[in-house]
Image (spheres, helix red, strand yellow):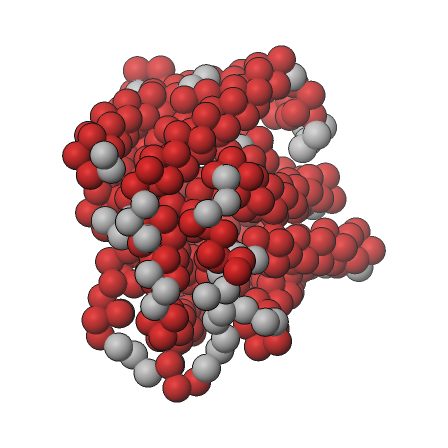
Amino acid sequence: MNKITSKFGSEKISKLLLKQAIPASIGILVMSLNMIVDTIFVGRWISVMAIAAITVVLPIAFLISSIGMGIGIGGSSIISRALGKQNIPKAFEVFGNQISLTVALSFLFVFIGTFFCFPILQLFGANGDIVFPATEYFHVIIWGVPFLAFAMMGNPVIRAVGKPNYAMFTMIFPAISNIILDIVFIKIMDLGMFGAGLATSISYAVSGLFVLWFFLSKNTELKIVPKYFKINISILKEIVALGGITVIRQGTISLLIIILNYTLFKYGGEISIAIYGIINRVMMFALFPVLGVTQGFLPIAGYNYGANDSKRVKETIKTSILYGTGIATLVFIGIMLFPDQLVSVFTDDKELLSLTPNALIIAFLATPVITTQLIGSAYFQAAGKAFPALILTLLKQGIFLIPLVYILPKFYGVNGVWMSFPIADILSTLVTYLYLKKEIRLNLN
């Protein structure tokens, strides 16, 4: 048994969580900074409509790449539990099936995206002046998506085998590449949206190739072994049951984006979509440490659940929620104190500067409570309990946020959209807390 992964079952939980969460947080931070810088560059060097175009296109790319993410998270849950039971052959077979599934499905969806570009963009809210820059951007980044899907698949597996620093690099290297290439292609070469898309697509390739290098060259418990590429139906079903949660969640987010973009365009025009683009980037950046704690939680909880150590599983849940809530509270305070300064980083457009800070404050009002919802849904995924994991994962974006985004603007206009976010956070957190409390009482005592 590898000494690194065996520490999941013996080392102090708080120390383990920091070892896993800090690299994950740094990786998410750098990727978030990358997307923020990307938004700043296109907003300042191209146009305000370029921000709106990216806001429309990226959810499509992330929907396709979420196939890899879902396969990665679903498979890594099985791998973590297999390692906890010291079942190394099963871990290898699961990983081989993950690779085959990711490659086949990501290229299939790229083919669909390429030949149905315009109707897909329209579906996701490309209207008015947004259509041309969105189309130009989409045509380029679609070819980098298979690399992104492979990287998304490999990232949670790298964490599952106890190498969180390398998982961090899968996010840092493409982010740095994208920032450098943005400067070259947009600022120096003046390639506009084509240059922005080219920089993003190449950065996806950097990430995917790094993950490929890791599993071919590093000394880990898992390697790329072609004989395991053959699909095993029972393993495939288990991967799909758990990984499908992530794909359905991303699909729900994409549906939410469609509804958001149409609602924002209806009640506030293109400028409201640009406002949401800025809010979305701030969300990705500000919450990076909370998401890092959630990612750090998964392999520790999965390993100890596989080892039938319910005491350590409960301690992992408690410690993760405590750390995440403290961080989320600090984030909330920072946003409430400096909304204008945050918005001014992205744009010097007077209309955006006047409208976005208030929207930002409203959207972040429930930030201190979100960790319970994130850890609660992650626990059920780590434990291999697909149905409750699916329901809890869909609570915020699907069950609560989509209806709220549709209903509230009828009464409060564009502000109704921003109000939907904290209301959905509070409701989903409450339900998750009750569900998790029952699970601990019945199955972890």
Most foreground residue, 275 or 95: 95
- Name the residue at the left extreme: 442
Q: Residue at x 58, y 44 (%)?
A: 19
Q: Residue at x 39, y 86 (%)?
A: 227
Mark count:
0
Most foreground residue, 222 or 424: 222
Q: Quadrant of the C terminus?
A: top left
What x and y, as percent, mark residue 280?
51, 35
What x and y, as percent, mark residue 323?
50, 28
- Name the residue at the right extreme: 188
What x and y, as percent, mark residue 400?
27, 30
- Name the residue at the front extreme: 10
Residue 144 found in image quarter: bottom right
Q: In the rendered image of this protein, does residue 220 appear above or below residue 322?
A: below
- Name the residue at the top extreme: 337
Q: Taking the image as drawn, is residue 183 in sight?
A: yes
Q: In the rendered image of this protein, does residue 2 appear above or below residue 382?
A: below
Q: Residue at x 36, y 75 (%)?
A: 89
Most foreground residue, 132 or 380: 380
Residue 261 found in image quarter: top left
Q: In the rendered image of this protein, does residue 431 appear above or below residue 288?
A: above
Q: Residue at x 23, y 50 (%)?
A: 386
What x and y, as percent, mark residue 176?
71, 53
Most foreground residue, 269 or 362: 362
Q: Taking the image as drawn, is residue 108 in sight?
A: no
